[in-house]
Image (spheres, rainbow, N blue to C red):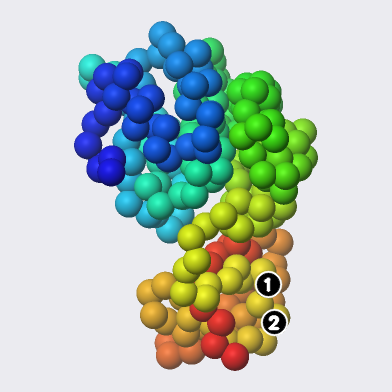
Protein backbone atom coordinates (compact mmCIF):
# COMPACT_ATOMS: atom_id res chain seq x y z
CA UNK A 1 0.00 0.00 0.00
CA UNK A 2 1.07 3.56 -0.62
CA UNK A 3 1.35 5.60 2.54
CA UNK A 4 1.52 9.37 2.94
CA UNK A 5 5.19 9.23 2.01
CA UNK A 6 6.43 11.27 -0.92
CA UNK A 7 6.35 9.56 -4.34
CA UNK A 8 9.54 10.85 -5.91
CA UNK A 9 10.33 8.93 -9.07
CA UNK A 10 8.06 8.87 -12.12
CA UNK A 11 8.22 5.10 -12.55
CA UNK A 12 7.31 4.65 -8.90
CA UNK A 13 4.57 7.22 -9.27
CA UNK A 14 2.87 5.52 -12.23
CA UNK A 15 3.17 2.08 -10.67
CA UNK A 16 1.68 3.42 -7.46
CA UNK A 17 -1.14 5.21 -9.24
CA UNK A 18 -2.01 2.04 -11.14
CA UNK A 19 -3.13 0.42 -7.89
CA UNK A 20 -5.67 3.17 -7.20
CA UNK A 21 -7.00 3.95 -10.69
CA UNK A 22 -9.47 2.12 -12.98
CA UNK A 23 -7.77 -0.55 -15.06
CA UNK A 24 -5.96 0.87 -18.09
CA UNK A 25 -6.09 4.53 -17.14
CA UNK A 26 -2.64 4.81 -15.56
CA UNK A 27 -1.10 4.52 -19.07
CA UNK A 28 -2.60 7.93 -19.91
CA UNK A 29 -0.88 9.78 -17.08
CA UNK A 30 2.74 9.94 -18.35
CA UNK A 31 1.63 12.25 -21.16
CA UNK A 32 -0.41 14.38 -18.69
CA UNK A 33 2.41 14.73 -16.17
CA UNK A 34 5.47 14.74 -18.45
CA UNK A 35 7.52 17.88 -17.84
CA UNK A 36 5.59 18.84 -14.70
CA UNK A 37 7.45 18.88 -11.40
CA UNK A 38 4.67 17.54 -9.19
CA UNK A 39 4.63 15.78 -5.84
CA UNK A 40 1.61 13.51 -5.30
CA UNK A 41 0.72 12.43 -1.77
CA UNK A 42 -2.00 10.20 -0.38
CA UNK A 43 -3.84 11.41 2.70
CA UNK A 44 -6.16 9.77 5.20
CA UNK A 45 -9.84 10.46 4.53
CA UNK A 46 -10.79 14.13 5.03
CA UNK A 47 -14.33 15.28 5.75
CA UNK A 48 -14.19 18.45 3.70
CA UNK A 49 -12.49 17.36 0.47
CA UNK A 50 -11.34 14.48 -1.69
CA UNK A 51 -8.12 16.18 -2.79
CA UNK A 52 -6.34 19.49 -3.20
CA UNK A 53 -3.62 21.29 -5.13
CA UNK A 54 -1.11 23.94 -4.15
CA UNK A 55 2.02 25.39 -5.76
CA UNK A 56 5.28 24.85 -3.91
CA UNK A 57 8.00 27.46 -3.54
CA UNK A 58 11.66 26.83 -2.77
CA UNK A 59 11.11 23.09 -2.83
CA UNK A 60 12.38 20.27 -5.00
CA UNK A 61 8.93 20.12 -6.61
CA UNK A 62 6.96 22.99 -8.08
CA UNK A 63 3.50 21.56 -7.36
CA UNK A 64 1.79 19.35 -4.79
CA UNK A 65 -1.40 17.30 -5.18
CA UNK A 66 -2.97 15.35 -2.34
CA UNK A 67 -5.65 12.68 -2.75
CA UNK A 68 -7.68 10.87 -0.09
CA UNK A 69 -6.54 7.26 0.12
CA UNK A 70 -10.03 5.81 0.71
CA UNK A 71 -11.55 6.73 -2.67
CA UNK A 72 -12.85 4.07 -5.03
CA UNK A 73 -10.96 3.92 -8.37
CA UNK A 74 -13.42 6.09 -10.30
CA UNK A 75 -13.60 8.77 -7.61
CA UNK A 76 -9.80 8.68 -7.35
CA UNK A 77 -9.50 9.22 -11.11
CA UNK A 78 -11.93 12.15 -11.23
CA UNK A 79 -10.34 13.80 -8.19
CA UNK A 80 -6.80 13.42 -9.52
CA UNK A 81 -7.77 14.90 -12.89
CA UNK A 82 -9.55 17.77 -11.11
CA UNK A 83 -6.35 18.63 -9.22
CA UNK A 84 -4.12 18.24 -12.29
CA UNK A 85 -6.38 20.78 -13.99
CA UNK A 86 -5.64 23.18 -11.11
CA UNK A 87 -1.93 22.60 -11.67
CA UNK A 88 -2.24 23.33 -15.40
CA UNK A 89 -4.30 26.45 -14.72
CA UNK A 90 -1.73 27.74 -12.23
CA UNK A 91 1.11 27.16 -14.68
CA UNK A 92 -0.73 29.08 -17.39
CA UNK A 93 -2.37 31.85 -15.41
CA UNK A 94 -0.77 31.88 -11.93
CA UNK A 95 -3.21 33.70 -9.65
CA UNK A 96 -4.95 35.57 -12.47
CA UNK A 97 -7.56 32.83 -12.90
CA UNK A 98 -10.30 32.02 -10.39
CA UNK A 99 -9.91 28.58 -8.74
CA UNK A 100 -12.97 27.16 -10.54
CA UNK A 101 -13.45 29.85 -13.16
CA UNK A 102 -13.73 29.62 -16.92
CA UNK A 103 -10.01 28.98 -17.51
CA UNK A 104 -9.94 26.07 -15.08
CA UNK A 105 -13.20 24.60 -16.42
CA UNK A 106 -11.87 24.62 -19.99
CA UNK A 107 -8.64 22.90 -18.95
CA UNK A 108 -10.50 20.36 -16.80
CA UNK A 109 -12.86 19.48 -19.65
CA UNK A 110 -9.92 18.93 -22.03
CA UNK A 111 -8.12 16.73 -19.51
CA UNK A 112 -11.22 14.59 -18.90
CA UNK A 113 -11.87 13.78 -22.57
CA UNK A 114 -9.35 10.90 -23.06
CA UNK A 115 -10.62 9.18 -19.90
CA UNK A 116 -14.32 9.22 -20.78
CA UNK A 117 -14.50 5.80 -22.38
CA UNK A 118 -16.50 2.64 -21.73
CA UNK A 119 -13.14 0.87 -21.92
CA UNK A 120 -12.29 2.44 -18.57
CA UNK A 121 -15.60 3.32 -16.92
CA UNK A 122 -18.90 1.60 -16.07
CA UNK A 123 -21.86 2.91 -18.04
CA UNK A 124 -23.36 5.03 -15.24
CA UNK A 125 -20.06 6.80 -14.45
CA UNK A 126 -19.45 7.25 -18.19
CA UNK A 127 -22.85 8.90 -18.65
CA UNK A 128 -22.44 11.11 -15.57
CA UNK A 129 -18.98 12.28 -16.66
CA UNK A 130 -20.29 13.19 -20.12
CA UNK A 131 -22.86 15.43 -18.42
CA UNK A 132 -20.29 16.71 -15.91
CA UNK A 133 -17.83 17.74 -18.60
CA UNK A 134 -20.30 20.23 -20.06
CA UNK A 135 -20.34 22.23 -16.84
CA UNK A 136 -17.85 20.87 -14.31
CA UNK A 137 -18.48 22.16 -10.81
CA UNK A 138 -16.02 22.82 -8.03
CA UNK A 139 -15.89 19.14 -7.13
CA UNK A 140 -17.54 15.81 -7.79
CA UNK A 141 -19.31 16.31 -4.44
CA UNK A 142 -21.03 19.39 -5.89
CA UNK A 143 -22.34 17.48 -8.90
CA UNK A 144 -25.20 15.37 -7.54
CA UNK A 145 -25.44 13.00 -10.51
CA UNK A 146 -21.72 12.32 -10.68
CA UNK A 147 -21.45 11.96 -6.90
CA UNK A 148 -24.21 9.35 -6.84
CA UNK A 149 -22.65 7.43 -9.73
CA UNK A 150 -19.22 7.41 -8.07
CA UNK A 151 -20.63 6.54 -4.65
CA UNK A 152 -22.10 3.26 -5.95
CA UNK A 153 -18.56 1.91 -6.24
CA UNK A 154 -17.54 2.63 -2.65
CA UNK A 155 -16.90 -0.44 -0.51
CA UNK A 156 -19.98 -1.35 1.49
CA UNK A 157 -19.90 0.81 4.59
CA UNK A 158 -22.01 0.58 7.74
CA UNK A 159 -25.34 1.64 6.35
CA UNK A 160 -24.51 5.26 5.63
CA UNK A 161 -26.63 7.42 3.34
CA UNK A 162 -26.42 10.95 1.98
CA UNK A 163 -28.28 13.63 3.93
CA UNK A 164 -30.19 14.78 0.85
CA UNK A 165 -31.97 11.42 0.73
CA UNK A 166 -33.20 11.72 4.32
CA UNK A 167 -36.72 13.21 4.73
CA UNK A 168 -37.09 16.53 6.54
CA UNK A 169 -37.95 16.04 10.21
CA UNK A 170 -35.79 12.90 10.49
CA UNK A 171 -33.01 12.28 12.99
CA UNK A 172 -29.51 11.24 12.03
CA UNK A 173 -26.11 10.67 13.57
CA UNK A 174 -23.04 12.51 12.25
CA UNK A 175 -19.58 10.95 12.21
CA UNK A 176 -18.68 12.82 15.42
CA UNK A 177 -21.40 10.86 17.24
CA UNK A 178 -23.75 13.82 17.64
CA UNK A 179 -27.44 13.40 16.86
CA UNK A 180 -29.27 15.95 14.67
CA UNK A 181 -32.72 16.84 13.44
CA UNK A 182 -32.90 17.65 9.74
CA UNK A 183 -35.03 20.78 9.57
CA UNK A 184 -35.01 22.70 6.30
CA UNK A 185 -33.23 23.20 2.97
CA UNK A 186 -31.46 26.49 2.46
CA UNK A 187 -29.84 27.57 -0.78
CA UNK A 188 -26.88 25.16 -0.69
CA UNK A 189 -27.04 23.52 2.76
CA UNK A 190 -29.45 21.83 5.11
CA UNK A 191 -30.22 23.50 8.42
CA UNK A 192 -30.01 20.92 11.21
CA UNK A 193 -30.27 21.15 15.00
CA UNK A 194 -27.92 19.23 17.27
CA UNK A 195 -30.28 17.75 19.85
CA UNK A 196 -28.14 17.96 22.97
CA UNK A 197 -26.87 21.52 22.63
CA UNK A 198 -29.72 22.86 20.43
CA UNK A 199 -27.07 24.51 18.25
CA UNK A 200 -27.74 25.00 14.54
CA UNK A 201 -25.45 23.29 12.05
CA UNK A 202 -25.42 23.57 8.26
CA UNK A 203 -24.67 20.40 6.28
CA UNK A 204 -23.76 19.79 2.65
CA UNK A 205 -26.52 17.77 0.91
CA UNK A 206 -24.00 15.03 0.08
CA UNK A 207 -22.81 14.58 3.68
CA UNK A 208 -22.85 10.89 4.60
CA UNK A 209 -24.91 10.26 7.72
CA UNK A 210 -26.43 7.40 9.70
CA UNK A 211 -30.23 7.37 9.68
CA UNK A 212 -31.81 6.92 13.10
CA UNK A 213 -35.55 6.86 12.36
Apparent side of residue 202 relative to residue 35 in the rendered image (left or right): right
Of residues 163 and 161, the one nearer the viewer is: 161
Q: Position of residue 89 (x, y in %)?
A: 54, 20
Q: Residue at x 64, y 23 (%)?
A: 114
Q: Is residue 172 visible?
A: yes
Give the class, few, some or many, for how many residues have Cα within 10 Å of label 2's Cα (few <14, many ≥20): some
Q: Which residue is mark 2?
A: 168
Q: Residue at x 35, y 15 (%)?
A: 37
Q: Residue at x 38, y 25 (%)?
A: 14
Circle 1 SS class: helix
Give the class, few, some or many, for how many residues have Cα within 10 Å of label 1's Cα (few <14, many ≥20): few
Q: How many marks?
A: 2
Q: Position of residue 160 (x, y in %)?
A: 53, 72
Query: Given contact means CB atoms under 8 Å apart, are the residues at marks 2 and 1 in contact?
Result: no
Give the numbered dot on residue 165.
1
Of residues 192 and 48, the one nearer the viewer is: 48
Q: Position of residue 63 (x, y in %)?
A: 36, 23
Q: Residue at x 61, y 23 (%)?
A: 111
Q: Position of residue 87 (x, y in %)?
A: 47, 23
Q: Quadrant of residue 17?
A: top left
Amino acid sequence: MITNNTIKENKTLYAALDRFLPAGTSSLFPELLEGHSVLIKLKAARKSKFGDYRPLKNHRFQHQITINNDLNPYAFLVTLLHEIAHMYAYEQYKNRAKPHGTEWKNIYAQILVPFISLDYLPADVYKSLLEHINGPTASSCSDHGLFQALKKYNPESNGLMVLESLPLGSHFKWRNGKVFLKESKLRKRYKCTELQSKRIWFFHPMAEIEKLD
